[in-house]
Structures are given as structure tokens and as C-alpha cells.
Amino acid sequence: MDHISARVTGKEFAFRVVLALLCAVIFLLIAYPLYFIVIASFSDSTLVSTGKVLFFPKNISFFGYQEIFKDMRIWTGYRNTVFYTLFGTLVNMLFTLPAAYVLSRREFRARRIIMFFFVVTMFFNGGLIPTYLLMKDLQLTNTIWVFILPFSVNVFYLIIARTFFETSLPKELHEAAVMDGCSHFTFFFKVALPLSKAMVSVIALYYLVGHWNDFFTALIYIRDTKLQPLQ
């Protein structure tokens, strides 16, 4: 038995070693391009273009950084991007989470019809030109609100949140809360949200990254350089 146990342990150890090496290789494949961008940014451009900079920077110079940070548009872009990201994510969560909770309640009879209209927007849209004309008629072009209001709810994230509320919150939990005099608002804020921290964090992160990487909105709807994000 000891011999069999040792053999199993040896196989498990070998598996862990192979798994660790595989994970290390995958990590290096992902991390090295990012690392190369950093060291290339303050290395001699000639050495970078000729392939002589691989693992360590050469002929270190911060001239490029000095020149680019002299342009005030960089700082304006950073300020705008941070604002659009934080405020936009806050608005997204204020719209998405209550809507998802309401649509998850089985006693809400109109939830299937409303959800149908939400899902339709995932497959059909008006196109770029009609959307631009709509934003123009709503006087959202060249304003900060064009980054916030038209993208208040992402239907895919709404479906994720609704499914989580529907499947992860037991029906008996709501019934017990109702017996204690708990309203839907109280149940949502004091029970549903605290039990959904993981889901809320993930959706907030997705929204945040989406706002941070958004450049197309500014490209189409913004002409004022003071409103341009970093991208």
C-alpha cells in the first residue's frame, strides 16, 4: 500500500510540475509583450528597430516621455477618461442592477415582454448614421453625456445579473424577508446586493474597462478637444 501511495504521489507531483511549467510559459507569452513595450519606450529607437533590445533597455533616454507630457492634451485626456470611467460605471450600475432585480422577480408579470425588447436590441440596431442623427437631435453630441447616457445598460451584463438574482437568491429567503415586513427596496439593498458582491464586482469591472478603452464614441460624437478622452 505504501508503494502504491508513493507511486500515486509521484505522479501527482509530476503533474503539478508540468502544470506549473505550462502556466509559467503562458504567463511569459502574455507578459513579455507588455514588458517589451515598457523597456522599448525608454530605449534607443534605432536599437529597438534593429532588434537589439530584447530583455533589457539600452541607451536609456526619457526624451520621448518629456516631449509627450509637454502636450497638455495628454493630461486633459487622462482627466476626462478617469471621469468618464468612474462616473459612467456608477451610472451603469445604478441602471443595470435594479433593472436586473426587477426582471428576476417571477411575480412581475411583464418581465418576459420587457426582457424580449431588451434582447431584440442585441440583434438589431439603427446603424451608425441614424444613431448619430438621434444623438444630435437629443443634443448629446459634443457633451460629456454622450459617453454616459446612451450606454447606461449593457444587455448582456443585464442578463448575467438577472440570471444571478433569479438562480442564486432562494425564493424562501425573500418569503422570510416579506414575513418580517421587508419591502422589495429593502430586500434589494440589504439582502440581494450584499449576497451578490462577486457578481456586482465582475460587472462593474467589465463596465469600467469598457469605458476606459472607449475611443469610438469620441471619434464620432466629440469635436471639442477639451472633452476628448485619452484614447
Image (cartoon, helix red, strand yellow):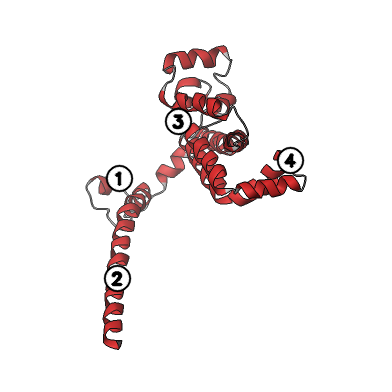
Judging by the rendered image, the residue that carries numbered circle 3 is: 215
* The C terminus, quarter of image: top left
Disc on res. 183: 4
Expressed as whole percent of the image width and height from the top left, the position of residue 146 reads: 55, 24
Expressed as whole percent of the image width and height from the top left, the position of residue 57 reads: 33, 55
Between the C-alphas of marks 1 and 2, the distance is 40 Å
Q: Amino acid at mark 3?
A: Phe
Q: Nearer the viewer, mark 4 or mark 1?
A: 4
Between the C-alphas of marks 3 and 4, the distance is 42 Å
Disc on res. 45: 1
Tag 1 and tag 3, C-beta contact below 8 Å: no
Q: Amino acid at mark 1?
A: Ser
Q: Amino acid at mark 4?
A: Ser
Between the C-alphas of marks 4 and 1, the distance is 64 Å
Judging by the rendered image, the residue that carries numbered circle 2 is: 17
Displayed quadrant of residue 142: top right
Number of numbered discs on residues: 4
Q: Nearer the viewer, mark 2 or mark 4?
A: 4
Q: Left or right: 187 with respect to 22?
A: right
Q: Farthest residue to the left: give it.
A: 50
Q: Please tell me how crowded label 3 is: few (under 14), some (14-19), or many (20+) other residues with Cα within 10 Å.
A: some
Looking at the image, tell me whether mark 2 or mark 3 is earlier in sequence order: 2
Between the C-alphas of marks 2 and 4, the distance is 54 Å
Q: What residue sits 51% from the left and 39% below the top?
A: 207
Element at badge 4? Answer: loop
Between the C-alphas of marks 1 and 3, the distance is 27 Å
